[in-house]
Amino acid sequence: MKIGIYGGNVRRNAALTSLVDEVVRFEDAGFSSYWMPQVGTFDALTMIALAGQQTSSIELGTAVVPTYPRHPNALAQQAATVNALTGGRLVLGIGPSHAPGIEALGLQYRSPARHIREYVTIIRSLTAEGSVDFEGSMYRIKTGFSCPDAQPFPIVVSALAPLMLQAAGEVADGTVTWMVGRNTIASHTAPRITEAAAAAGRPDPRIIVGLPVCVHDDREQATVRAQQIFAGYGNLPNYRRQLDAEGLKQAGQMAVVGNEDQVSESLAAYFEAGATEVIASVYPSGDDSRGSFARTHALLRRLLK
């Protein structure tokens, strides 16, 4: 199984640079990738640039950078710089985010699929050719830049709805999901984005599935803990639709939990559904948080191949 880590959490009283040390440890353990979110804490791409200086092989991704607050020229230049500093190991995960958060910034959240299609097209041109001359319905831009050691990098989109999956298949390199169940991956996500990519003459897309994961003998206790940690996602319309599609009331019920055999079986089912990679957001359950983390990471290491 191709398994990455969905991390980016700074432990209490730990320095921000501790994240760099964490990425180094996961590279040494053999994980294929490490992903950081762009939320209300640190700047993910800056941290990836720092981690890239201390690592050599692990893929480094964002899951995801919200697009509406960032002009595509600015993000393209930043991402090209980070990719150069990491030796070509960046995977730029982007997405429109959610209406409440974007509108709280005083911005309009409109036509997300069209927005993403134009946004990716602009970034692709700037990072592959160094220039862009684009006129669309949402962006008009003619500019360029020259970043030393620049090279193209994969772009994946947080696509959930049909129009977003079509746009991602046609102009991006795949999708990175969160809070999407395996039934939805099999019946909706994988076939839609794969069909769109094929129709556009593009390679098979990457389908990167982000999941909360906890190895624990008491599945009920681990699920309750997940419900506490991830409760807020159920209040966001985009995620609410994904939970409803799986028949789940709370976001924490999406977590992959159980003993080693049960978690292994559940993760394998995601790959059978169409996932090309799983990125695990490991969380603890029980009184021994350190031991809980260690047990889950140990299983994930055994599943790597």
Image: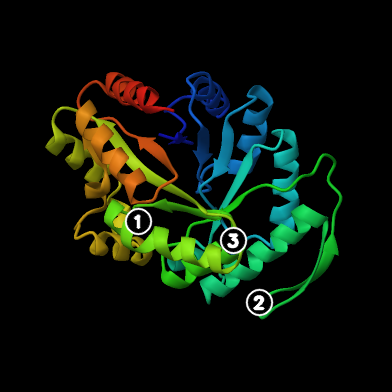
Query: Is residue 96 visible in this depiction of the protein?
Result: yes
Which quadrant of the rendered structure holds the C terminus? top left
Judged by depth in the image, the label closer to the viewer, 1 or 2, is 1
Amino acid, disc 3: Thr
Q: Nearer the viewer, residue 40 or 78?
A: 78
**Mark 1: which secondary structure?**
helix
Q: Check contact, mark 1 vs mark 3: CB within 8 A.
A: no
Q: As drawn, which residue projects farthest toward the bottom?
A: 137
Q: Relative to 110, is 171 on the left or the right?
A: right
Residue 68 bears which disc, if any? none
| Residue 1 quadrant | top left
Residue 24: x, y in percent? 55, 22
Q: Residues within 10 Å of mark 1 (few under 14, many from 20)?
A: many
**Residue 257 % position (x, y):** 22, 36
Question: If you read the primary sequence from the N terminus, does the residue marked by circle 1 or circle 3 appear first?
Answer: 3
Horizontally, is 26 left or right of 303 in the view? right
Relative to 81, residue 282 above or below: above
- Circle 3 packing at 10 Å, graded few (<14), some (14-19), many (20+), is some
Alpha carbon separation for disc pair 1 and 2? 30 Å
Instruction: Tell me the distance, in whole angstroms, between the alpha carbons under discs 1 and 3.
Output: 24 Å
Secondary structure beneath disc 2?
loop
Type of amino acid at the residue the image marks with label 2:
Met
Q: Residue at x 55, y 29 (%)?
A: 16
Q: Which of the labelled discs sits on residue 67, or is there none?
A: 3
Q: Earlier in the sequence, mark 1 or mark 2?
A: 2
Q: Earlier in the sequence, mark 2 or mark 3?
A: 3
Circle 2 Cα neighbour tier, 10 Å, few/some/many (<14 / 14–19 / ≥20): few
- Residue that numbered label 1 is attached to: 185
What residue sits 47% from the left and 31% below the top?
10
At a point 36% along the width and 44% down the height, the residue shown is 271
Residue, disc 2: 138
Q: Is residue 214 above or below residue 141?
A: above
